[in-house]
Amino acid sequence: MFPYLGLKASTNQKQIDERLQYRPQVFEFFTTSDDVTPQGLDHLKQMIGYVQKSGVERVVMHHPMKFNGQHNEVSVNPDTDPEQYQFMMNSSKALIKVAQQSGTQLLIHGGYNQPVSEILGKFGSISAGRKIVLERLDYFKSLGGSNVMFENSISPLFDFGDRLVESEVLKHHYRLCYDTSHGFIVLHGDNQKLQKSMAHLRDQIVHYHFVDSMGQFHDSLTLGQGAIDWQPLKPMVNRKATNIFEINLKDQFDCREMLESYEYLKKVWNL
């Protein structure tokens, strides 16, 4: 029943086992560049099978956040950063194939947190950079179909809360992941605008990252410790979607902050 107990871990089996003891209904793998090498992909497939055999039917892979210390931006320029571009494209295609073979989902970030000055320097305008992002997401959508989804960023290249971006997203019929903290930060901590944004995109959202924030920067707080007003969000969510609790952990081998967030949300939503 939504919201699910959704937990996240790396491909480290010790982390996975720590999560599985709580019998999550949704499991999300946080992958790195090491997980998309030939050896890494073999291990990832084994761990996906391991999680599925434990009884978890809903599995998501989070595309690697970084390559060579830089964010793995969909908007990367193939002329100025050819190695970064090849990694972004090849890793996306490889993981889409894994998702299709294993009956899982791949989550790709539409962007991370590129500052406006950097975007303008690279593309000349935000709209030009956004056009590149949408073209590449269209390509991944054509490859991945119902096995791929796209997550909102803090960067203006793919930030939910911006009505222009949301209108484009709806036109492209993307399957979406909505990260509540990213939306809240983009909207400068405005709860009413967050509610409107989540309601506006609700029908295309297939997965949520429930995470609290003070709305100023990427802080990834346990639910109830930030400034998000959770109670009014209950009617704004798509109850057909899945979810995880993407919280910063004090100890990567102890997911208590995720569990506390799940219990908090159930209490606030009277579930």
Image (cartoon, grey):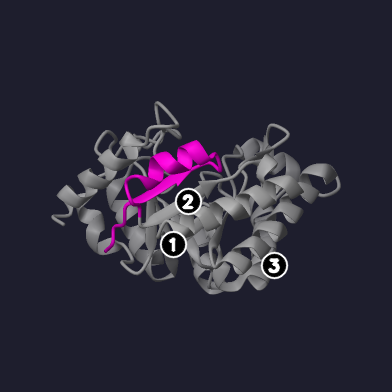
> In the image, which disc is placed on residue 28?
2
Determine whether 59 is above or below 226 in the image.
below
Q: Secondary structure at mark 3?
A: helix
Percent coordinates x, y for residue 3 in the rendering: 29, 58
Q: CA distance from mark 1 to mark 3?
A: 24 Å
Quadrant for the N terminus in the image: bottom left
The answer to whether residue 121 of the structure is visible from this angle is: yes
Q: Which residues are magenta?
A: 1-24
Percent coordinates x, y for residue 129 in the rendering: 68, 52
Percent coordinates x, y for residue 73 in the rendering: 66, 46
Q: Amino acid at mark 3?
A: Tyr
Query: Which mark is first along the chain, 2 or 3?
Result: 2
Query: Which mark is first along the chain, 3 or 1?
Result: 1
In the shown orientation, is residue 49 left or right of residue 200?
A: right
Return the residue found at the far left.
Answer: 270
Percent coordinates x, y for residue 211 in the rendering: 36, 43
Q: Dot 1 corresponds to which residue?
A: 58
Query: Which mark is first along the chain, 2 or 1?
Result: 2
> In the image, which disc is placed on residue 121?
none
